[in-house]
Image (cartoon, helix red, strand yellow):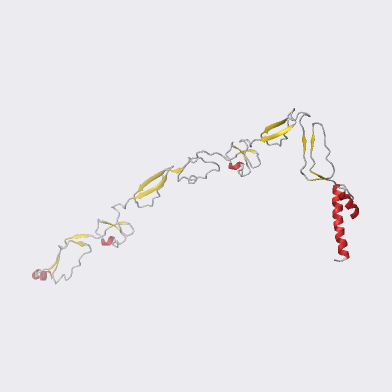
């Protein structure tokens, strides 16, 4: 080990001893090693110092080293050494517990449990809006706070198909579970007509169903009709494919009869119209009559 290293080690040890000597009040910060050795050697080893004192007396603890086992105690006969046992209930303010007049000190202090009215509120996270109006709670800082949540009780509402009454906005706040939003159902029936029909509920009601009757027997499907008035007997009526009613134009000819003689009358034009099927067109056998007519 070099001389410089050894000197540095000794200086570090000296400085540590200086610091301790100053703290103990037995030396100064400029003491050398020899001074420090003398100062520490002068400390008396007191071991376990014990003493007894009476009321009003004092005991000066001697300078030196004490091993921590010594005691100082009072002795009877020198005064009133009565000790008081006290009880105290915790409060929101700090309390200093002292013996009453006539007692030398306290033998013990019993601290009662925190009163039932006080509870740990550190977990409270409710705000005024979470508590019913006019109800009181204590927030997490111990502040007494009234709630602000509206108490709506049992809110009821009846909806219908009327304007501005087809929905209901549930108001903010507490509901007791007895309120109800309802509708009054109504059943209706309708028979098809030639015009479109809009079936609406009675005021204050909502349609639950509409029964549409069958098309009346007087109405039939005429989509395949292609007859016109020229195809129908006069005095008779038909309905066209578009639903228009028209009268027939065919003349009822009944039983039509006619003769042709082959001389003056060679043809006969059958008139338009309906024929009964009993009419005839015949050729006369009266040649003489025919010739005379010539």
Q: In which quadrant will I find the C terminus?
A: bottom left
- Please name the residue shown 74% across and 32% down the image: 105
In-front residue for pair 203/180: 180
State the residue lying farthest toward the top.
102
Q: In which quadrant will I find the N terminus?
A: bottom right
Against 204, residue 267 (above or below) is: below
The quadrant holding residue 138 is top right
- Please name the residue shown 79% across and 35% down the image: 52
Residue 95 as seen in the image, left or right of residue 270: right
Residue 71 as seen in the image, left or right of residue 216: right
Q: How far across and how far down the image is residue 160, in percent?
A: 45, 44
Q: Count numbered badges in the picture.
A: 0
Q: How far across and how far down the image is residue 232, in percent?
A: 25, 60
In-front residue for pair 107/255: 107
The answer to whether one can see residue 208 in this image is yes
Against 120, residue 198 (above or below) is: below
- Please name the residue shown 86% across and 62% down the image: 6
In-front residue for pair 171/166: 171
Against 256, residue 151 (above or below) is: above
Q: How far across and how far down the image is residue 118, in percent?
A: 63, 37
The answer to whether one can see residue 90 in this image is no
The quadrant holding residue 204 is top left
Q: How far across and how far down the image is residue 157, in percent?
A: 48, 41
Residue 292 as seen in the image, left or right of residue 24: left
In-front residue for pair 235/179: 179
């Amino acid at each position: 080990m070099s001389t410089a290293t050894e000197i540095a080690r000794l200086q570090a040890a000296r400085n540590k001893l200086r610091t301790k000597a100053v703290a103990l009040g037995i030396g100064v910060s400029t003491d050398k090693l020899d001074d420090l050795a003398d100062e520490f050697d002068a400390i008396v080893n007191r071991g376990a110092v014990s003493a007894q004192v009476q009321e009003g007396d004092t005991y000066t603890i001697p300078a030196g080293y004490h091993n921590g086992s010594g005691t100082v105690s009072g002795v009877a006969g020198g005064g009133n050494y009565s000790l008081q046992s006290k009880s105290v209930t915790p409060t929101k303010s700090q309390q200093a517990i002292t013996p009453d007049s006539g007692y030398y000190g306290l033998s013990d202090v019993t601290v009662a449990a925190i009163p039932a009215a006080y509870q740990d509120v550190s977990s409270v996270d409710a705000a005024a809006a979470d508590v019913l109006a006019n109800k009181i709670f204590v927030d997490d800082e111990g502040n007494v706070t009234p709630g602000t949540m509206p108490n709506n009780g049992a809110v009821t509402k009846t909806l219908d198909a009327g304007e501005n009454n087809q929905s209901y906005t549930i108001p903010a706040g507490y509901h007791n579970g007895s309120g109800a939003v309802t509708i009054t159902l109504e059943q209706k029936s309708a028979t098809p007509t030639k015009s479109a029909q809009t079936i609406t509920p009675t005021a204050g009601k909502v349609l639950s169903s509409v029964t549409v009757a069958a098309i009346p027997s007087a109405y039939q499907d005429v989509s395949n009709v292609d007859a016109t008035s020229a195809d129908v007997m006069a005095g008779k009526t038909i309905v066209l494919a578009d639903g228009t009613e028209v009268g027939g134009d065919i003349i009822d000819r009944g039983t039509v009869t006619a003769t042709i003689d082959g001389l003056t009358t060679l043809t006969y034009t059958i008139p338009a119209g309906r024929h009964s099927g009993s009419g005839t067109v015949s050729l006369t056998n009266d040649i003489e009559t025919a010739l005379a007519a010539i």
